[in-house]
Image: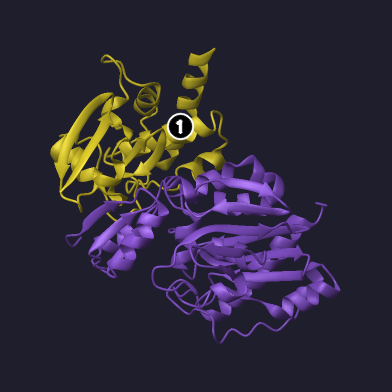
Chain colours: A yellow, B purple
Amino acid sequence: MAKVTIKVNGKNYTKAVEDRMLLVDLLRDELKLTGTHVGCDTSQCGCCTVHIDGRAVKSCSMLAAQANGASIVTIEGMAKKGKLHPIQRAFSECHGLQCGFCTPGMIMATAGLLKDNPNPTDEQIYKGLEGNLCRCTGYINIVKAVKMSAKLLRGKKH
Amino acid sequence: MYALNYVKAKSLREATAFIARNPEAKLLAGGMTLIPTLKQRLARPTHVVDIANLPELRGIAAKGGKLVIGAGTRHHEVATSAAVRKAIPALSGLAAEIGDPQVRNRGTIGGSLANNDPAADYPAAVLGLAATVVTTQRSIAADDFFQGLFATALEEGEVIVRVEFPLPKRAAYSKFHHPASGYAMAGVFIAQTAGGVRVAVTGAGPGVFRWTAAEAALAKSFSSAALEGLPLDASGLNNDIHADREYRANLVRVMAKRALAKLSGRK
């Protein structure tokens, strides 16, 4: 068993987990944070994207033990005090989703993209979301939502 | 995934001592290949030894006419490093095109080289730039390091510590992405180095290789026209559901021309 001490959405946890447990299973099964989804389970779809120490990663592609000591943000950590995060608001307003299954991963990937590039072009958005798949193929509105997110986030700073 | 034991190495010495004692242990850095492999039960190591954050393996430095990148350096760090962009812009561009953002935030240069996937990007840069792979035991020239499909000169227990890139006069990389995986269907790295022109091809064959006919032609005339009608034997190239070997051979030529086009207009 591996002892894992992590901070998730600002809250500290220490858990003893099987060495082979994936981070996404720790989040979902142990911490009951089921907003992080498992889509393909083969590192392709990005539904399991979370932020580890500020960088977007696929939580199905790392062991929980590898995250020991890390600070993690999941989709549940985006809204603050019942108020949606600007990216969540943009996805809602632009209807950047169809079935919604990929949405948590899309939002976390968008947050990662906009952190590196606060004002991306369409081409940069396509590249920035390359690690995420929407099997409803609702990409047009997702791209719109990313653009609105960028505007909202930039507005916030000024 | 089969049951295994996770071990966090506190130093490189501890990691090498551990794998010497446990021949069925595997090193784990970014895990972008190893973890999916474990999930598919295609490997069954007794232990995974986490070396991802060892300080001995981290860092980027330009010194003495060389760019030195620690084996544990992540693709994102190489892609965004001002030192890399200044020294070898083609290398930062290559790193920025590996996989997807999430993969680049985890995957490492040492992991990519040790794995030597035939469609990986870094092998093209390392071979094209005549880099040196420095391990816990020795220095290995790129021409000796890559030995075909997932095979390298690394001995059991030998660990890549860093890669030393001599600075080229100029270099460019062009890749035809597989639209789903992002891997190279064909990727061509062209460099004008102190030792002459080098053309390294990834994705097209069972392992990275040098297109020597193109090197000779470009040495005479460093231009796209020099590649017209050059022989490129397709018989050993990959032939699969994604592309047949003749198509891949054509892609190699086109990617080489695109790499040259990137260089024209640049000093």
User: How many badges with numbers are in the image?
Assistant: 1
Q: Residue at x 65, y 64 (%)?
A: B189
A78 in relation to A139, above or below:
above
Q: Residues within 10 Å of mark 1 (few under 14, many from 20)?
A: many
Q: Residue at x 47, y 25 (%)?
A: A148
Spot the residue most to the right. B220
Left or right placement of residue B202 versus residue A32 in this view: right
B152 in relation to B75, above or below:
below
Residue ID for mark 1: A146
Quarter that holds the C terminus of chain A: top right
Q: Where is residue A128 in the image (x, y as percent from the top left)?
A: 49, 42
Q: What residue type is labelled 1?
A: Val
Judging from the image, mark 1 belongs to the subunit labelled: A
Q: Position of residue B181 (x, y in %)?
A: 43, 59
Task: Report if residue B182 is visible in the image.
Answer: no
A83 in relation to A12, above or below:
above
Q: Position of residue B113 (x, y in %)?
A: 49, 64
Judging depth in this view, the residue of A27 and A4 nearest the camera is A4
B142 in relation to A81, above or below:
below
Q: Which residue is drawn at 62% across and 58% down?
A: B164
Residue B220 image-quadrant placement: bottom right
Judging depth in this view, the residue of A8 and A81 nearest the camera is A8
Judging depth in this view, the residue of A75 and B190 nearest the camera is B190
Left or right placement of residue B30 versus residue B78 in this view: left
Q: Residue at x 39, y 54 (%)?
A: B29
Task: Report if residue B231 is visible in the image.
Answer: yes
Q: Where is residue B88 in the image (x, y as percent from the top left)?
A: 69, 52
Question: Considering the numbered disc 1 on the image, is that residue within a helix, a strand or a loop?
Answer: helix
